[in-house]
Amino acid sequence: MAAEANLKTWMRKENIYDNDLYDILTSQGVSNPSEDFADYTQKQWDVLWRKGMVERAKELKDQKAKLNMEKKMTKLEKYWRKQSGIKSTSIKKKKDKAEKKEPENSKKAQNDALAKAAELKKYLQKNDCFMMDLVMVCAETGINTEADIENIDSNDAFDEIYRQVRVLRAQELKDNDARMRMEKTMTKFEKLWRSKTGIKKTSVQKSKKKKDAKKDPKTQKNEAMATGGAELKKWMRKSEIWEMQLYEELMSNGISGPDALKDVSQDDFDTIVRKVRVEKFKDLKDQAARQRVDKLLVKFEKIWRKSSGIKSTSIKK
């Protein structure tokens, strides 16, 4: 409990406190940033960025709120990179099992990108959304013409382009006006891309033949987390059993509200709790933090038993 208070105090002191960011960090085992961020990996940061920024963006409709969240994430990223020594230029992405470095923002790199993506540059200028860094990122990923824009085939692919543009403009984005200009330009580019591909922000794929085509589990989970979990999240906080891992496990089992607990069997409950403990204990080395999780799960069990009517004495040994 003291360790978590330490994290919360630090986040408030740095003016980056946010309930969801705090919950994600604690679920990743971060309780003392000055120590824990030293071993915090790029993969962990990518998860934090996806959950804290990309998925949250669907909930934050107000532009000011989005900018405020991005400002917090930028400040948090800067501190983490300083503690861990991991540079943004060292990020490598795998594509077709081959590693590729982030685009370099040098004069030569800019000239090469302009030569390669001259047609794309003209198209962006015509539509008032030209940005050198955007052209460089697009050229690096093989998007050199207007027609190539359709090759950005998913929301994740677009989010990755946005992230790389942000990396290249990291220095300029310290200025709020520069951040606003970039956001405005990327919004225009996003509209052009969505118009060409027909991809919606909700990532729902439409099919004339199969309207109810089954989506892969990961897509189902992300969409449910972004749209259907508001009631569950609110209830868990009110009941003082909020835990990101438990929330995700409940959502993945189709439990989006307290009323659904009455239909959860003993076996299903045991499976959910076991998975949460296993996943949480992978990250939590501190005994006090592990005890906090067990205490929370015991409280969750009491709520479930009351809702389902299943008594502990009915468990077969």
Image (cartoon, rainbow, N blue to C red):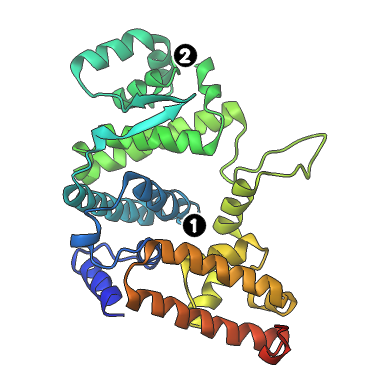
Q: So how many labels did they put on this image?
A: 2
Q: Which residue is at the far right?
A: 209
Which quadrant of the view contains residue 289? bottom left
Badge 1 density bin: few <14, some 14–19, many ≥20, Cα 10 Å: some
Nearest to N terminus: mark 2 or mark 1? 1
C-alpha span from label 2 to label 1: 32 Å
> Is residue 261 positioned above or below 191 on the image?
below
Please provide percent x and percent y for residue 306: 66, 89
Q: Residues within 10 Å of mark 2 (few under 14, many from 20)?
A: some
Q: Secondary structure at mark 2?
A: loop
What residue type is disc 2 on? Thr
Quarter of the picture holding the C terminus:
bottom right
According to the image, label 2 marks what residue?
A: 145
Which quarter of the figure has residue 139?
Answer: top left
**The quarter of the displayed image where residue 93 is located:** top left
Q: Which residue is mark 1?
A: 59
- Residue type, numbered disc 1: Glu
